[in-house]
Amino acid sequence: MKKIGMIGGLAWPSTVEYYRGLCTKTNEHYKANGVLAPYPTPHIIIESLNINETRKLRGIEGDEASWERFERVFRETFLRLRKAGADIGAIASNTPHMRLSRITRGLDFPVVSILDATAEAVRALGGKRALILGTSVTMGSPAYTDTLRKYGLDVLPRLDEKQTAELDRLIDIDLFQGKIAGAHSRILNLCREPIEDGANDVVCLACTELPLAFPEHKDAACFKVDGIWFINTTVVHIDAILREALA
């Protein structure tokens, strides 16, 4: 396997899920191919960043210069991971992917994108339109919209200001600290109005903490709750990272 260089800590609960998922799926891959136990585990280097510090470095949408320090932190982290022997890179978080094209400038190894992995999952499910749920930065960025449209998909209107603030509170105050009680009901309430067509509309849980609100579906790439289809961006990203590592 190729060695994976992963940026984590944004936030730590989802980084744990990435490590667990990559190890579990690697075990399953080798078991299915006749390898005897103990099953191989992936080569992973993780550098955990301080989310409090990276949050302060966020820029303003539309002001490219304001993001330079944020991008530099991630680019320099990838360079350290590369120097440590990583063959491929990944960020265990959605929000930094809004700046991925600039973060990866000048890198000489591939970084697996959660944006492409999510768009591929929506299309594979047969969805036509996607509602993006994530941090205010993620929902305010054109990155998901542009990627989904590249795959022939459309995007539903984003949440309003009040709903966005509610989702930010859920992510920052509860899920970042591993508090999941009642979280799935709050997410469902935010989805019901925007979702117009249960057959064609899909909700992308585009913050790697949001799938933690649905623990019974934590290993599913997609799942249905109350007639609404959800894409677990953590799982689809893990699957994409593993495919690249095994290629």
Image: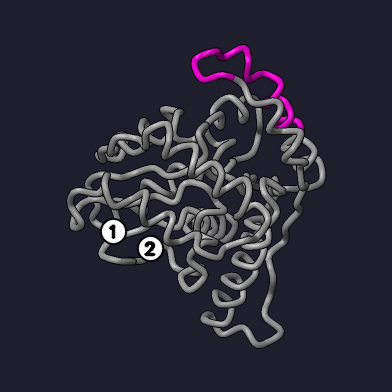
* Chain part drawn in magenta: 60-76
Location of residue 183 in the rendering, given as x and y in whole percent from the top left corner: 50, 59
Q: Secondary structure at mark 1?
A: helix
* Location of the C terminus (image quadrant): bottom right
Task: State yes or no: residue 72 in magenta.
Answer: yes
**Most common SS among magenta residues:** helix
- Whether residue 171 is situated above or below residue 61 in the rendered picture: below
Left or right relative to 196: residue 30: right
Task: State yes or no: residue 102 in magenta.
Answer: no
Left or right relative to 163: residue 168: right
Nearest the camera: 19 or 56?
56
Residue shown at the point (20%, 52%) measured from the top left: 200
N-term-proximal mark, 2 vs 1: 1
User: Identity of the amino acid at label 2?
Assistant: Cys
Location of residue 170 in the rendering, given as x and y in whole percent from the top left corner: 54, 49
Location of residue 189 in the rendering, given as x and y in whole percent from the top left corner: 36, 53
Q: Secondary structure at mark 2?
A: strand
* Location of the N terminus (image quadrant): bottom right
- Whether residue 140 is situated above or below residue 231 in the rendered picture: above
Q: Look at the numbered discs 2 and 1 and tell me whether their residues touch, using CB distance below 8 Å.
A: yes
- Whether residue 179 is situated above or below residue 33 in the rendered picture: above
In the drawing, what numbered circle is on residue 222?
2
User: Identity of the amino acid at label 1?
Assistant: Leu
